[in-house]
Image (spheres, rainbow, N blue to C red):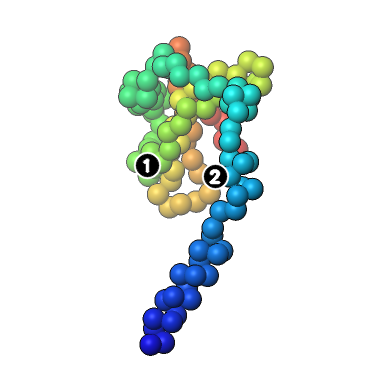
């Protein structure tokens, strides 16, 4: 009997706590003006896709003779690189040391013209 009473009390309390008020329903309407103010997403395809950028980065590592034996590739992102007014998209690769020491990374950027550079250590 106590079990049924507890279940009934939980159901009644949860509907009161999580129920939606009539005034909340009015504020849920989105206008076309609000939609037009949202930031627009550019859906263009990058000139160099990630698999090709990965090959460029691997060639760069071999050419520069960078020792990655104690590192693993932990992160790949497309970021905006450069000054605020002149930033350009680049593929950013981060290799992390297996011992987990902070700041011991290899960071390489692959630009959309096919050029790769090692990022300066912070």
Residue nearest the viewer, comparing 84 with 24: 24
Badge 2 local density, few (<14 within 10 Å), some, or many (20+)?
few
**117 on left or right of 3:** right
Verify CB contact (< 8 Å) between mark 1 and mark 2.
no
Quadrant holding the C terminus: top right
What residue would you read off at disc 1? 72
The answer to whether 41 is drawn above or below residue 71 in the figure is above
Q: Which residue is mark 2?
A: 103
Label 1: element kind: strand
Residue at (38% x, 38% y) in the render: 73
Residue 29 % position (x, y): 58, 36
Farthest residue in the front direction?
Answer: 22
Please say if 108 is above or below 11: above
Front in this rendered view, residue 79 or 63:
79
Residue 54: quarter of image: top left
Mark 1 packing: few (<14 Cα in 10 Å), some, or many (20+)? some
Q: Residue at x 41, y 13 (%)?
A: 47
Whether residue 115 is visible to the viewer of this picture, yes or no, is no
Q: Could you tell me which secondary element the residue under label 2 belongs to?
A: loop
Q: Please determine whether, in this image, residue 11 is positioned above or below residue 35.
A: below
Nearer-the-camera pick, 82 or 35: 35
């Amino acid at each position: 009997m106590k079990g049924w009473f507890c279940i009934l009390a939980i159901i009644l309390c949860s509907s009161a706590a999580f129920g939606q008020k009539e005034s909340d329903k009015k504020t849920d309407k989105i206008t076309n003006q609000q939609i037009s103010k949202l930031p627009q997403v550019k859906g263009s395809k990058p000139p160099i896709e990630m698999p090709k950028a990965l090959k460029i980065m691997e060639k760069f590592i071999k050419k520069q003779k960078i020792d990655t034996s104690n590192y693993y590739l932990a992160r790949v992102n497309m970021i905006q690189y450069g000054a605020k007014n002149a930033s350009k998209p680049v593929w950013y690769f981060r290799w992390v040391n297996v011992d987990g020491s902070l700041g011991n990374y290899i960071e390489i950027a692959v630009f959309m013209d096919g050029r790769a550079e090692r990022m300066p250590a912070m």
